Image (cartoon, rainbow, N blue to C red):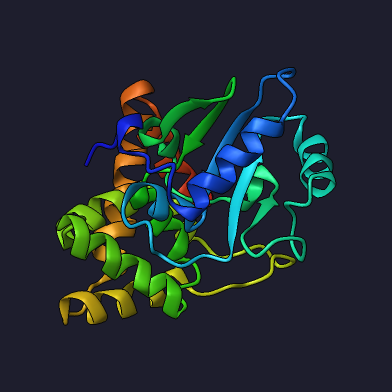
Amino acid sequence: MVFEAAHINWNCPAGRRLDQLASVLPREPRLDITVFGSAPLQLLIESSFVSEDVDIFPQEPFSLHLERFVDRHHLAKDQTPLYIAVCDPLTFKSTVDWRDRAVEAQRHGHTFRIVHPWDVLASKLQRLEEKDLAAFKLVIAKTGHPTAAELIAHLQKAVELFRPRFEDEQAHGDMTANTRALWRELWQTDIDVRAAIIRPALQRMERDYVDHDPTLKARLGNIRRPSKPETEP
């Protein structure tokens, strides 16, 4: 499903707040700002979708610069009802190719990259609280997409999110369990996450590796199979 700059509703609450930010930013340096979280759903799907903040991150190395600027202009948390949250780029985790679908628009000399709604949904599946489930229902109700088949194909591109978390990483949820819960809620059916999403994605990755190096499969097989001990003559 394709969205373009013309689809962005700058008159919704998130749009007005971003426009306000762009209007007070210095013209230099020209920033490249990604908008993620729930704000893209307001901007592209439904202007009344509730969000208490607008999550953004700029290109490196301007995160701290932008964070200070937002605070100085009273757009930060506890300074205004709908605040700007300047985040680390590592905060947003979604499909490997989310940038290819993002919608870009120029505002007051700065570029705003709005994350595609499907990639927003993939990121929300890591937590899947009530408001995250509401986001899935909203997008499907308003657009008819993604279908179950489309979401399966999309989540295969986010297979890394299904891997176990690092020991020191704060856990927000279990992607596999959340995906099963989502399928039961939206389509009243069960899904074998490993068979439908994880295994096909890994097979695609391995196929591409083998295509680039025909010897890889054999070499991997030798690694997996311990060599037999030599016997005495």
Residue 81 percent coordinates (x, y): 65, 65
Residue 91 percent coordinates (x, y): 63, 52
Name which residue lies at 16% across and 59% down: 147
- 134 up-or-down from 74: above or below: below
Q: Is residue 100 left or right of residue 62?
A: left
Residue 176 percent coordinates (x, y): 40, 71
- 177 up-or-down from 139: above or below: below
- Number of dots carrying numbers: 0
Q: Is residue 232 left or right of residue 86?
A: left
Residue 64 percent coordinates (x, y): 82, 40
Name which residue lies at 21% across and 59% down: 142
Work out whether residue 158 can be spotted. no
Q: Return the residue nearer the eye: 30 or 233.
A: 30
Q: Quadrant of the N terminus?
A: top left
Name which residue lies at 75% across and 55% down: 76
Q: Which quadrant of the figure has residue 124?
A: bottom left
